[in-house]
Image: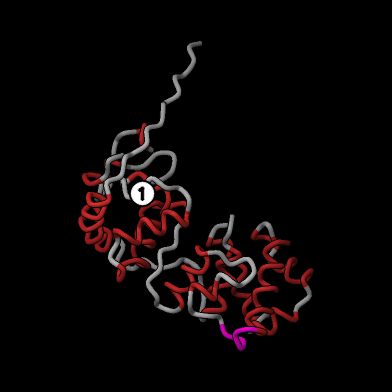
């Protein structure tokens, strides 16, 4: 039986001026496609979104939403999370995976919020990333969705689509965030992340993007070119 020839991957070369122009063209298309784009995580306040985002690491938003309804009734404040037994927290969040580390991050973050921020989730990047277990991605989710501060959250969909669309050569979330900040209008940062996430889930999927039915394929260097997927 003949062996399958493995497709050699090709890297898209990025020109920032061209990338910025590409963003200008695809933004209005994505706005029409996904007028209700927002985070899929359920929350009522910044603390709930912080906890939900920590839980969403290596877990689906659907799964997180299945348990947070009960969690947020049980633990209503940072103080309650901080005082809770770490084993009980771990048991409560077990279905999200990596529950031991997540329990530590949640308890320690809430302890820091009580001790250093008067019980309120901070609303700046500089302060948020000082919380245990909170990196720039989590901070950006909270800033953009709970506080209305323009922020680019780079999850796997944002990374994949940004590279396919020739917006960045970086797969590192922090480097990609800074690349996108240079070419996406600041007022659109939060929504742009949501647009790419929605489009990644619905059309530009990891293994086989639906280029034939993609409304932005004419602007995409990787469209119908598996070597660039």
> Label 1 belongs to which residue?
168
Q: Nearer the viewer, residue 174 or 44?
A: 174
Magenta extent: 116-120
Q: Secondary structure at mark 1?
A: loop
Q: Nearer the viewer, residue 123 or 217?
A: 123
Identified at 71% across, 69% down, the residue is: 92
**What is the x, y in percent for residue 159?**
43, 51
Q: From the image, give the main secondary structure of the stretch colored magenta.
A: loop
Q: Is residue 165 above or below residue 83?
A: above
Q: Residues within 10 Å of mark 1 (few under 14, many from 20)?
A: many
Q: Nearer the viewer, residue 35 or 153?
A: 153
Please say whether residue 76 is visible from this viewpoint: no
Q: Is residue 158 above or below residue 54?
A: above
Specify whether 193 is left or right of 69: left
**What is the x, y in percent for residue 147?**
44, 79
Scheme of colours in the image: secondary structure
Identified at 21% across, 44% down, the residue is: 218
Q: Is residue 25 located in the magenta-colored stretch of the structure?
A: no
Identified at 51% across, 81% down, the residue is: 45
**What is the x, y in percent for residue 148?**
40, 77
**What is the x, y in percent for residue 48?**
56, 76
């Amino acid at each position: 039986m003949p062996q399958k020839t493995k497709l050699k991957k090709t890297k898209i070369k990025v020109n920032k001026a061209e990338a910025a122009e590409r963003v200008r063209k695809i933004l209005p298309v994505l706005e029409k496609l996904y007028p209700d784009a927002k985070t899929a995580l359920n929350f009522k306040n910044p603390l709930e979104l912080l906890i939900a985002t920590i839980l969403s690491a290596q877990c689906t938003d659907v799964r997180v939403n299945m348990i947070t309804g009960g969690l947020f009734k049980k633990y209503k404040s940072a103080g309650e999370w901080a005082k809770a037994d770490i084993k009980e927290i771990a048991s409560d969040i077990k279905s999200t995976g990596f529950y031991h580390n997540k329990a530590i991050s949640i308890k320690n973050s809430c302890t820091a919020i009580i001790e250093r921020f008067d019980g309120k989730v901070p609303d700046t990047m500089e302060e948020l990333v000082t919380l245990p277990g909170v990196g720039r991605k989590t901070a950006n989710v909270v800033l953009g969705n709970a506080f209305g501060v323009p922020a680019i959250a780079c999850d796997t969909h944002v990374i994949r689509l940004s590279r396919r669309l020739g917006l960045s050569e970086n797969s590192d979330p922090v480097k990609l965030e800074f690349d996108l900040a240079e070419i996406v209008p600041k007022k659109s940062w939060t929504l742009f992340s949501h647009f790419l996430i929605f489009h990644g889930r619905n059309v530009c999927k990891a293994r086989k993007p639906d280029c034939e039915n993609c409304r932005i394929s004419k602007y995409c260097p990787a469209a119908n070119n598996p070597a660039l997927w």
